[in-house]
Image (cartoon, rainbow, N blue to C red):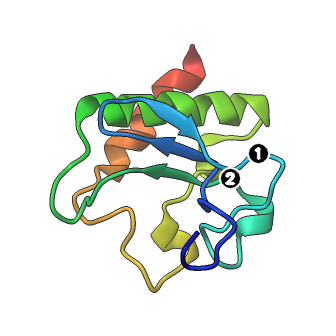
Amino acid sequence: MSNGWAGVGYHKLVFADGSVETGRPEQTVGAHAFGANRRSLGIVLVGDFNRERPNPAQLESAARLTVELLKKYRLPVEKVLPHRAVNTDTDCPGRLFPWAEFVQRMLRGMKD
């Protein structure tokens, strides 16, 4: 807010303990991925994944949340992209983020 922003730019926040909080309502345009905000929902895992991996609880919670949203909006896993795939000026979610493992968790969740 002190930066003049309307609030958090993400729709969902996933904390290290696996808890999830809502940021912006899903119907509100986010401010998380320049150029893609109008056609996407932003989920952030709180942490610095250039310095450490997300813990298993956080990763599992994020995968479960993402699968819920994919099912809700009838989208395939292939629509889920890391921030760096949308904005090339970032390495987000970080070089230690296990993207392949995250995708596998989502794929397993889509089968349930």
Residue ID for mark 2: 41
Q: Residue at the front extreme?
A: 2
Q: Position of residue 20 (x, y in %)?
A: 49, 33
Q: Residue at x 75, y 45 (%)?
A: 25
Q: Position of residue 64 (x, y in %)?
A: 50, 27
Image-quadrant location for residue 59:
top left
Q: Secondary structure at mark 2?
A: loop
- Up-down: is 58 above or below 42? above
- Up-down: is 66 above or below 89? above
Residue ID for mark 1: 26
Q: Nearer the viewer, residue 3 or 56?
A: 3
Q: Residue at the bottom extreme?
A: 89
Cα separation, mark 1 vs mark 2, equals 7 Å
Q: Secondary structure at mark 1?
A: loop
Q: Residue at x 30, y 38 (%)?
A: 16
Question: Closer to the N terminus: mark 1 or mark 2?
Answer: 1
Image-quadrant location for residue 32:
bottom right
Q: Residue at x 23, y 37 (%)?
A: 55
